Each structure stands twice: as structure tokens, then as C-alpha cells.
Amino acid sequence: MKINLDLRFLCVVLLIAFLVALWGWKPWSASTQTITVSGEATISAAPDEFVFSPTYQKRAAAVTDAISQVSELGNGVVAKLKEMGVAEEKIKTSVTSQQYYEPTTGKVTNEFAANYAVTATVNDKEVAKKILEYVATTPTLYGVSPQSTFTKETRKKLESEARGKGLADARAKAKQTAKELGVKLGRVATVTEGSGFGGPIIYGYDAYATKPAATSQSTTPPVLQTGTEDINFTVSVVYKIR
């Protein structure tokens, strides 16, 4: 009999505890209303990576001669870049060839054009300045100035900073909206990041370029002026309201 009474008492206690918790939670009165806000942030910083992409071209009656001539020129440029401090693993090259066509008539000629493309990456602005001055003296088809961007480590750091500021901006907007509406801001329901962080545009080259660059007698070197690059972040946050 005592055991039965103890079990009954325990069941009553558990039932009361459940009812108290249920009353505090009040799932039947939970609001489904939400506030949706967008957060934005922009971080500006000076680039710390410089990508050079000069291209050279030679033409000849035989494709092998065109390739040989442009390879001699391109290999010399690569050797000079190494002397100037560009690491071997930071240099990429590619050679392409095609039948040459006359730009004024659009007709294919009996000559072949071979292009030698170089991609060299450096992380020192002073070295980049010297490379720019050197590349400007070579007979490039195009691609003298470098593309200024960020190293992976720097970009990751800047993106993290932009994300934090973007989320803080969203929360500040949500608090202001809730205050103006006379409601209390609840927990976050969903977070959706925008299209992503902005990245640099790497310019390629036309494999069917029609003529080599004109030779200039100017001795004035170009100036490496990198400015700053923006890292943008957008986010959409949905908050519950109480």
C-alpha cells in the first residue's frame, strides 16, 4: 500500500512539474512573426599580391620557327624575373600557336603566330615596381601592369572582418526596427549570406592577337599605383519577435 502511495505521489509531482514547464513555455501562444533585415559591410585595404601577365608573340613561315623564336624571348623574360626575386613556383608559362591572319582584310596568311604567356606572382610591392619597369622595356603584346589583389591569408582575414561587421549591422537594424514597432527582438531564425565577397578580375589574353606591340623609344617607366581594393559582404537575417 505504501509503495502505491509513493508512486502516486511521484506521478503527481512529475505532472505538476510538467504543467509548470508547459505554462512557462506557452507553445500555444508562441509568435510566428519575424523581422527580416539586411546587413552590409565594406572593408578597404591595400593589395599585397601582384600578378603580372605579359604575353609575347613571334611570327614565321613555319610554326616550329615561330615557337622557337617566341620561346627564346619568353625564356629570357622568365630568367630575368627569377633574377629579380620571383620564386620559380610563382611563375607559370604557356605557348600557343595559330595561323596568322591579316587584321585589315581578315584573311588567313601563310604565316604562323606563336604566343608565349607568362604569369608571375609576387608579394612585395617594391619588387613589383622593379618588375613593372623591366616588363615595360620588353616587346610585350599586352599585359604590362600587374593585377593587384590579396594573398589568400589576407583575403581570409578581411572577409572575416567584413562578415563580423555585416552581422553587427544587421543586428543593429533589427534592434532599431523592433524598438520602433514596440516589440522585443527574439532569437535568430535564419541567416543567409549574399552572393559572396568581391574578388579581383584577372584579365586574360587573346590567343588570336594580330600584331606585336609597337616599339616605343620612351624611357619613362610606368608607375605602380595600386590604390585599395574593397571586400564587400551582405547578409540577410530573420529574427523572431516577442
Image (tube, rainbow, N blue to C red):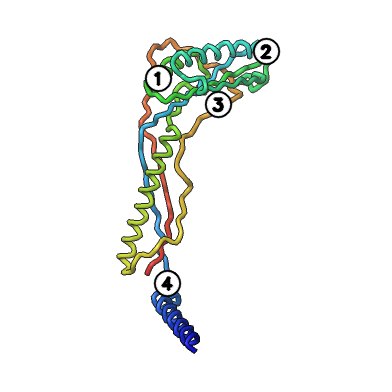
Frontmost of labels 3 and 4 is 4
Badge 4 marks a residue whose secondary structure is loop
The relative height of residue 66 versus residue 142 in the rendered view (above or below) is above
Extreme residue in the bottom direction: 1
Name the residue type under label 4. Answer: Ser
Q: CA distance from mark 2 to mark 4?
A: 76 Å
- State the image quarter where residue 162 is shown: top left
Q: CA distance from mark 1 to mark 3?
A: 24 Å
Provide residue 3's location: percent of width, then percent of height.
49, 85
Label 1 neighbour load within 10 Å: few <14, some 14-19, many 20+: some
Provide the residue designation for mark 4. Answer: 31
Label 2 neighbour load within 10 Å: few <14, some 14-19, many 20+: few
| Residue 93's disc number | none
Badge 3 marks a residue whose secondary structure is loop
Provide the residue designation for mark 3. Answer: 205
The residue sitting at 40% across, 58% down in the picture is 37
Provide residue 231's location: percent of width, then percent of height.
40, 40
Query: Which residue occupies the foreground of this view, 231 or 163?
Result: 163
Q: How many marks?
A: 4
Name the residue type under label 1. Answer: Val
Q: Mark 3 or mark 2: which comes first in sequence?
A: 2
Provide residue 146's location: percent of width, then percent of height.
45, 25
Q: Mark 2 or mark 4: which comes first in sequence?
A: 4
Query: Which residue occupies the foreground of this view, 137 or 239?
Result: 239
The relative height of residue 77 versus residue 23 in the rendered view (above or below) is above
Q: Mark 1 or mark 3: which comes first in sequence?
A: 1
Provide the residue designation for mark 2. Answer: 64
Q: Mark 3 or mark 4: which comes first in sequence?
A: 4
Q: Mark 1 or mark 2: which comes first in sequence?
A: 2
The relative height of residue 153 versus residue 31 in the rendered view (above or below) is above
Provide the residue designation for mark 1. Answer: 127
